[in-house]
Amino acid sequence: MTSELTSDLIDRAKALLREAPVVDGHNDLPWAMRHHVGYDLDAIDLTADQSGRLHTDLARLAAGGVGAQFWSVFVRSDWAGDHAVSATLEQMDFVRALIDRHPDRLRLALTADDMETARAEGRIASLMGAEGGHSIDCSLATLRALHRLGVRYMTLTHNDSLPWADAATDAPKAGGLTRFGEEVVHEMNRLGMLVDLSHVSADTMRDALRVTEAPVLFSHSSARAVCDHPRNIPDDVLALLPGNGGVAMATFVPQFVLPAAAEWSAAADENMRAHGFHPFESTPAATECQHAFAALHPRPIATTATVADHLDHMREVAGIDHLGIGGDFDGVAFLPEGLDDVSGYPNLIAELLRRNWSQADLAKLTWHNAVRVLRAAEDVARELQRTREPSIATIEQLDGAKG
């Protein structure tokens, strides 16, 4: 956090968040709880301060002014088939258990109206997002089942390309979206499930924006023009959002927001593999490995100002109506200074206030844009369900092979 963020700016930020709390697009607490304690909510008390162990607990969510959270039900993209599907269901089961354990703090949200009700009740609206199309195993029926169980966005890929969609960080297999990939997007539109374009290649982004009938989401991606990382959004794609109505939620991940951190992160990932850990592993031993590497190789430090630079650029290209926030807490080992955990959102809002962002614009960033995009997807789905039956197409029928 910069020294220029005065107590007055912080107080103004907290006051704004009481009226327009943060809708955060992506939090990996379910994955962290799977790794730490096998989802055992008795083993980690999330009503207590879990600093040093997790980025997220209920008290710090409240302190950060979070009013709605998309909980990621991520599973690794090198898991495939039934294993990926069942692990996704386990992630979803944990989110339901978390909400049931804390009904005074959390409320299951399936619609935009549910989000508004939760805000009025002083509870955190809890939504689910599936991070990667591998979670449906090339099955539109499985996609529909995830929606019935509460998933309200699906990221088309994670880090590995699929037979029907290319990822940002893997060699292309599909050339963007295949015919089956387009059918996935159309079925998501019919369901009212947001099409999440974080993690996908730029060609997949462009294809999805071409074929979608509803606004899209980038649940945790920043601006490629500011940090040239394939996980970020090119300007030509950002410029398409006003016509689509979608929302790009800027992320806090250092290697996606600070060029020097991207180079450091690649070396840190290699170190993790050399010690037998997957780079996304978040067990205590894996975390210790990450921190030992950082002690020997000091990492470049991103700050709230680094993230604000991305938001400034994204506002210039896409417009204020198309921005949001997706921190990726508990999905990464390190975070920017001032955004160290979920209590840090007021620091970002204070930095934007310092840059003369208006209260009306900040309220769009934190709350209104995300609620609007989900409501718009619901509206599109209602219209499509009047004229379109659930798709029973298969990847073999549309693309010739499952891959």
Image: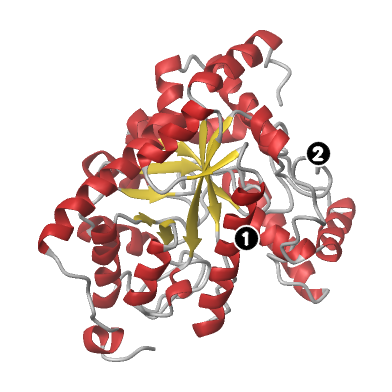
Mark sitting on residue 296: none
| Quarter assignment of residue 145 | bottom left
Mark sitting on residue 94: 1
User: Looking at the picture, how far across and down is residue 161, in whole percent?
Assistant: 45, 74
Residue in view at x 74 percent, y 67 percent: 38
The local secondary structure at tag 2 comes to loop
Residue in view at x 46 percent, y 42 percent: 249
Residue in view at x 76 percent, y 48 percent: 54
Q: Is residue 373 left or right of residue 363?
A: left
Mark 1 or 2, closer to the camera:
1
Look at label 1 and name its amino acid.
Phe
User: Looking at the picture, how far across and down is residue 12, in whole percent?
Assistant: 59, 12
Above or below, comparing residue 274 to residue 25 in the picture:
below
| Quarter assignment of residue 251 | top right
User: Looking at the picture, how far across and down is residue 112, in whole percent?
Assistant: 36, 40
Quadrant location, the C terminus: bottom left
Would residue 142 be visible to someone looking at this image?
Answer: yes
Look at label 2 and name its amino acid.
Asp
Above or below, comparing residue 36 to residue 294 in the picture:
below
Mark sitting on residue 49: 2
User: Looking at the picture, how far across and down is residue 221, in whole percent?
Assistant: 49, 48
Above or below, comparing residue 360 to residue 184 in the picture:
above
Would residue 339 be visible to someone looking at this image?
Answer: no
The local secondary structure at tag 1 comes to helix
